[in-house]
Amino acid sequence: MSFKTRCLALALGAFAGLTGLSPVAASAAQTQVTMYYPVSVGGPLTQVVDKLVGEFEQANPDVKVNAIYAGNYDDARTKALAALKAGTPVQTSVLFSIDLHELKDMGVIRPFDDFATMPEDKAWLQSFYPGLMDNGRADGKTWGIPFQRSTIVMFYNKDAFRQAGLDPNKPPRTWTEMREAAAKLVQRDGNTTNRWGVMIPSTGYAYWMFGALTKQNSQTLMNPAGTRTMFDSPKAVQALEFWTSLSKDGVSPKGLIEWGTLRQNFVEGKTAMMWHSTGNLTAVLKDAKFDVGVAPLPGNTEPGSPTGGGNFYLFKSGSEAEQRASFRLVKFLTAPERSAQWSVATGYMGVSAASYDTPTLKEYAAKVPQTLVARDQLSVATAELSTHQSGRVRKMLEDALQSAITGQQEPRAALTGAQAQADRVLKPYQR
């Protein structure tokens, strides 16, 4: 059996758990829970979520879960909030972890502390990796529970490294090393570039990639309260200058690099290195026809990546019984074994240390050590950009980044403009 076949068998086998539960006929007294879920952010998600929800319903026959799938995080957020505004009950959703401040300001979510009253519930609240909770807690309460979580990792083509005379087991650890390796990895046929050295996506989640670059240059993008940003600090400007220099130096393509197609470009050999969510790990290992390496992101003054991905939220919607049922659903889905199953099937992280102690993840990590890179990077991770009015502030930064990447503005001017806009939006929250 090939390495990739074994990986797939492990991923599928992880969902054979909870056997021996006999089907229970649906009852008219079932409590209904509606959950919105984003499915176009990485990995084969819909079938995986369906399987987990089915396991929950088998174990909790008094609850019926209506899973409504959206596109990306913004799509799920828009649809969930539209349903709430229309008076349609929505009890829970996986949304951006960075939506916390805005959802809280809107008054549409409840803290998990309202439901976690028993000792085992309180222990569950404390069981998650602290680095994943930076975007889940505010005002001394827990508003978001990590589930579909990630850090950015560097995928690289080990076969291309060998062909270029690079050590496939020594990926770049610094910006300088990455630039030098990328220059050796570029393949050109006349004026046509058949393979780029490195690609960093600049659509979809450009702010996230920028957060990695600034962390690697010892700069955070916001204060913990989400009331101030530091977009135009000298270290942030330097980080954007480095990003834009990659295309100027000919190791990365000019213009914007699409988030949605980058994974396919990588598995087709069109770039030797890419920065992307660990949530693509399982899909990359399945589709790539070459030896795939996964490494922590290279650093400059220090290593690092922002955390990313989605948290479960509980909405102030529906009856108290429905909200309590949704709490049970979230607790079930984030239990160590389910978190381990989720990690194997998708590439997203297990969200607790206990998930990595399960036989499921222990066996998988022994076969696929790449799965541990994102988790290990938590030791140097920072919180993802999260502010009040987060959607507007992110858009301001994204527009500035893309303006610089496409050559419409110099990095300093672009970031100075974004900072001025963010200052105006966040001023009412600065007290």
Image (spheres, rainbow, N blue to C red):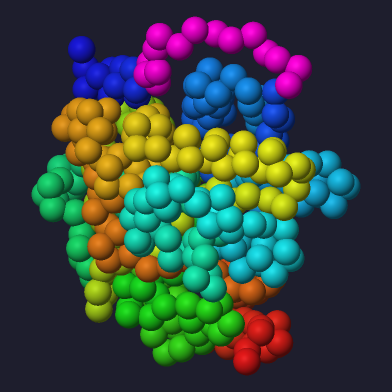
Residue sitting at x 38%, y 80%:
219
Q: Nearer the viewer, residue 235 or 307?
A: 307
Q: Which residues are magenta?
A: 15-29
x then y, percent, for residue 100: 59, 63
- Image height of 134 relative to 329, above or below: below
Residue 195 at least partly seen: no
Residue 150 falls inside the magenta stretch: no
Q: Which residue is nearer to you in this view: 194 or 257?
A: 257
The residue lying toward the viewer, choosing from 148 and 352, is: 352
Left/right placement of residue 41 relative to residue 125 reads right
What residue lies at 63% left-to-right and 92% top-to-bottom? Answer: 431
Looking at the image, residue 300 sits to the left or right of residue 396; the answer is: left
Q: Name the quadrant containing residue 19.
A: top left
Question: Picture coordinates of residue 317 (x, y %)?
Answer: 75, 48
Instruction: Report if residue 27 lies within the magenta region.
Output: yes
- What is the quadrant of the N terminus in the image? top left
Q: Measuring from the top left, give residue 73's x and y in whole percent.
A: 62, 49
Give above or below for 297 relative to 385: above
Farthest right residue in view: 86
Residue 404: name its quadrant: bottom right
Q: Residue furthest front?
A: 118
Q: Main secondary structure of the magenta part?
A: loop
